[in-house]
Amino acid sequence: MSNEYKEWINDKVCDTLFDANAIDKIEEICTTPYSTRKYVHGWKNGQKVVFMVWLNDEGEWVFEHRELDK
């Protein structure tokens, strides 16, 4: 994958979460091995949050809240 394409995907992932008002600040975006899904670590209302973001079969960017590892 080219760097430009990777940056485009990361931008779309960020836009998806910011547009949904699901996150205030993003700290890290991690790619899952052998997958196009991204884990996004960040902050919402002063609390740490983690989301998984991916492109579904209909071509829409979707996300799910994930539990933090403790």
Image: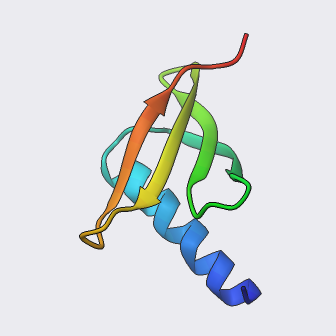
| Residue nearest the observer in this picture, 20 or 24 | 20
Task: Report the residue at 58% width, 41% height from top.
Answer: 25
Q: Quadrant of residue 56?
A: bottom left
Identify the image's colour scheme: rainbow, by chain, secondary structure or one colour.
rainbow
Looking at the image, residue 3 lies above or below residue 48: below
Q: Position of residue 8 (x, y in %)?
A: 57, 79
Looking at the image, residue 55 lies above or below residue 24: below
70 to the left or right of 8 = right
Task: Report the residue at 51% width, 58% height from top.
Answer: 14
Task: Report the residue at 33% width, 54% height from top.
Answer: 19
| Residue nearest the observer in this picture, 26 or 13 | 13
Q: Position of residue 22 (x, y in %)?
A: 39, 38
Looking at the image, residue 8 lies above or below residue 29: below
| Residue nearest the observer in this picture, 54 or 3 | 54
Q: Quadrant of the N terminus?
A: bottom right
Q: Position of residue 28 (x, y in %)?
A: 72, 47
Q: Residue lying furthest front in this view?
A: 34
Q: Quadrant of residue 27?
A: top right
Looking at the image, residue 14 lies above or below residue 65: below
- For the image, the number of numbered tags is 0
Q: Position of residue 34 (x, y in %)?
A: 69, 61
Q: Quadrant of the C terminus?
A: top right
Task: Report the residue at 46% width, 58% height from top.
Answer: 54
68 to the left or right of 23 = right
Q: Residue lying furthest left in this view?
A: 58
